[in-house]
Amino acid sequence: MKLTLRVWRQKNPDTPGAMAVYELDGVSEDMSFLEMLDILNEELIVKGEEPVAFDHDCREGICGACSLVINGAAHGPERTTTCQLHMRSFQDGDTIDIEPWRASAFPVIKDLVVDRSAFDRVIQAGGYITAPTGAAPEAHATPVPKADAEFAFEHAECIGCGACVAACPNGAAMLFTSAKVNHLNVLPQGSPERETRVLDMVAQMDAEGFGGCTLAGECATACPKGIPLFSITAMNKEWLRATRKVKR
Amino acid sequence: MALTFWHSTLGKKIVMGTTGLIMIGYLCAHLLGNMKIFFGPGEFNAYGHWLRVMGAPVLHHEWGLWIARLVLLAAVVLHAVSAYQLSRRDIKARPQKYVHTKPRMSYATRTMRWGGVILGLFIVWHILDLTTGTTHSGGFQEGHPYQNVVDTFSTWYGNAIYIVAMLAMGMHVRHGFWSAAQTLGAGNRTRDRGLKAIANALAIVLTAGFISIPVGVMTGVVS
Ligand code: HEM
Ligand code: FES
């Protein structure tokens, strides 16, 4: 495959960036999108140019490190992570636009790499349980109703990649925050902090400068793990409940 | 507590959803009342008079009407202020657009902000036109709402403003009703088809119902 790539290049947070055009030949349709970028970077290094910086780690779709807005869609045209996207989703001769996540809470560090530490601070605000940890407890020690377990699992799938923020027209982190809140709030292990968790995580989300929800639904469409839009509805319900229970 | 609520994006959105639903409820009542126009000036003007004695003998003359007006005013102001503040925040949270863009949201979703502004302007014009009579076209007569309505819809601009605003209202209600259900935590997978159907039905009935009045005047059914 022969491709024309238009890639966002930005030296550092303080220098304005721009799209740069690269021609790339000899791409196999069995390559993953990141392998295709590896080939581009090898060519750039040979030519003595700065390689394109992008985030990645597991390349198995489970860590949430990879990002990229590909042709205007977070993680590209398929419902998966960029590392699990393959070049067979594109045509020979295609022009592909590659941009970083865009949100003021996710500033660009370099090229396609953004600072997602705002998510870490949202987690620190309440995305944990305070039960003492140790060896894994016996699985049947705490019974969990099947429906609750399913609900928790569905939300626990979130890998915190930030595609929801990137896709949201308001740069909102509602889907991420709701996935984390719902995952823990429905389980007995998470119930001691049920109210403070949702209040604190939402407050931190606001403090990080994420936007608000307008129910556009772009986040759920972009989510590589299929976290549903109703996750946000469920968090709204938890938040309303918590404001009634906790006096602040 | 109230401040925590107002300072949170979630709380502000809940204010917006609740006030939006109050206004939708009002629109339903308003439409039912307005349909009396098709039964002649006697019935319509009597309805207009009843609005002033609503709640009697408990309430003094026009108190019921003024309570309704105050609730609606509070709803519009809270709704518009939270819409403005949240929109400002949303735009700031996403300052840089993507080079590669494609519109994917539905039309009703994309037009909530400008549609809302159109509704706000319409509400002001509508009150000046048919409540106070300030900008009314042909000799506003207090206590003769039937004639006033016919006068307004006998002008091309009266019809144009009203019909455009009602189309905007339909769109706003379509996304707004469903959104409010999510904001207030009432939506879920099993209820979604029902909620969307109610939203569409509300939008269509309210829009068609209100537009039937200028159409009635234009076709001479109401004169
Ligand atoms: C004063 C003029 C108005 C303005 C400026 C305005 C603006 C807005 C905005 C910006 C939104 C948020 C859109 C989004 O989340 O995508 C909204 C939502 C909404 N509006 Fe309005 N609007 C106005 C009048 C009305 C009226 C007259 C009604 C009643 C029919 C209404 C009902 C709603 C509802 C139910 C929502 C959904 C709230 C939610 O998402 O929870 N609005 N409005
Ligand atoms: S690199 Fe780990 S999810 Fe893509």
Image (spheres, grey):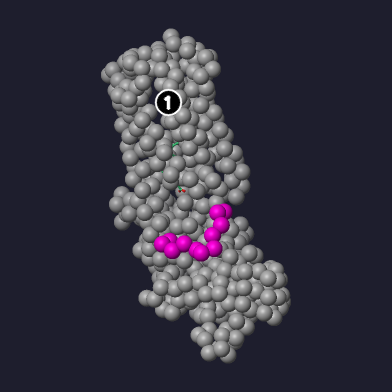
Where residue A32 appears, as percent x and y from the top left, is 66, 76
Cβ of disc 1 within 8 Å of ligand 1? no
Whether residue B98 is in magenta: the answer is yes
Three-letter residue code for mark 1: Gly
Q: What residue would you read off at disc 1?
A: B158
Vertical placement of residue A89 versus B101, above or below = below
Whether residue A148 is in magenta: the answer is no
Question: Which residue is painted at 61% across and 43% down in the image?
Answer: B193
Where residue B221 appears, as percent x and y from the top left, is 53, 14
Q: The residue marked by circle 1 belongs to what chain?
A: B
Residue A106 appears left or right of B191: left
Where residue B199 appears, as percent x and y from the top left, is 54, 39
Residue stretch in magenta:
B94-104
Vertical placement of residue B199 versus B46, above or below = below
Where residue A238 appears, as percent x and y from the top left, is 46, 54
Residue B114 appears in which quarter of the rendering? top left
Question: Which residue is painted at 55% across and 74% down in the image?
Answer: A21
Tell me which secondary structure the magenta stretch mostly adopts. Answer: loop
Are there few (<14), some (14-19), or many (20+) residues within 10 Å of tag 1?
some
Vertical placement of residue A178 versus A161, above or below = above
One can see residue A193 in this view:
no
